[in-house]
Amino acid sequence: MKTMTNGARRLGIGVRFAVMAIAGLALGGCVQIATPDKPIEINLNINIKQEIVYKLDGDAKKLIEQNSEIF
Amino acid sequence: MLKQWKPAGWAMAAIAVTAAVGLAVPSAMAQRDPAYEAARSGGQIGEQPDGYLGFVSTPTPAVRDMVNDINIKRKAAYTSGAPAGSTIEQFAFITGCNLIAKTKAGEKYKGPDGRWLTRDAGPPVRAANCP
């Protein structure tokens, strides 16, 4: 089996082509998954503001507890 | 000799911490001045959305001085307590949201439209951007 017959080689090439074709189809399938028309926008401003609000809320509660004579 | 000093150091640190806690707790538990409490429950003064006290009706000089004094102390607390990345006004406003939420039934608070409201059993009317 050191030297491959022509037929066996053809078969090997055929299999290789089949694998590539399937891979190609699979990739094609991946690319074809519908992408949204509009880019997804993430408004970071709102996120940061919300983060500050929650931080402030916790700090405000502590401030009220620690200075109960003026609140 | 050093080995004998180390535990003593720890003990002294523990005593210092205990003393510090002992001193800190009474100040944290300090209650409102009776005159302040009376003006609140009597509806003469109320909580504003900006984090300060306001006059619902024309105050007596004593009530006016007391409220001004408390508001100055509040401003100092907001100034020293405002976390990085926020302004004094933002911190005061969020504290105001909490203070209005904490009002007791019968106490006055200023709604987002600027009118004085009386707290009832339900939740208070607060600014939309309160957390």
Image (tube, coloured by chain):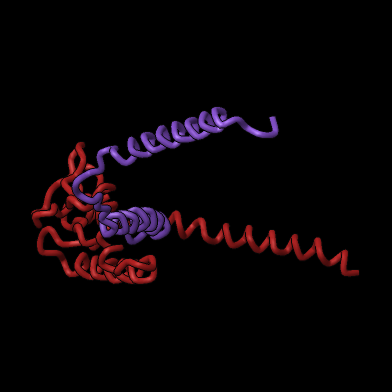
Q: B100 or B34: which is nearer to us?
A: B100
Left or right placement of residue A3 versus residue A42 in this view: right
Q: Quadrant of residue B28?
A: bottom left
Q: Position of residue B11 (x, y in %)?
A: 75, 60
Q: A4 or B1: which is nearer to us?
A: A4
Q: Residue at coordinates 20% horizontally, 57% vertically from top-left?
A: B49
Does residue A40 show up?
A: yes
Q: Residue at coordinates 9% horizontally, 57% vertically from top-left?
A: B114
Q: Colour of chain B?
A: red
Figure quadrant of the N terminus of chain A:
top right
Figure quadrant of the C terminus of chain A:
bottom left
Which residue is the extreme one toward the right? B1
Q: A13 or A4: which is nearer to us?
A: A4
Q: Residue at coordinates 38% horizontally, 68% vertically from top-left?
A: B84
Q: A31 or B112: which is nearer to us?
A: A31
Left or right placement of residue B88 versus residue A13 in this view: left
Does residue B106 show up?
A: no
Q: Residue at coordinates 12% horizontally, 58% vertically from top-left?
A: B56
State the purple chain: A
Q: Position of residue A41 (x, y in %)?
A: 24, 52
Which residue is the extreme one toward the front? A6
Q: Position of residue B123 (x, y in %)?
A: 21, 40
How many dots with numbers? 0
Left or right placement of residue A19 versus residue B129 in this view: right
Q: Quadrant of residue B21?
A: bottom right
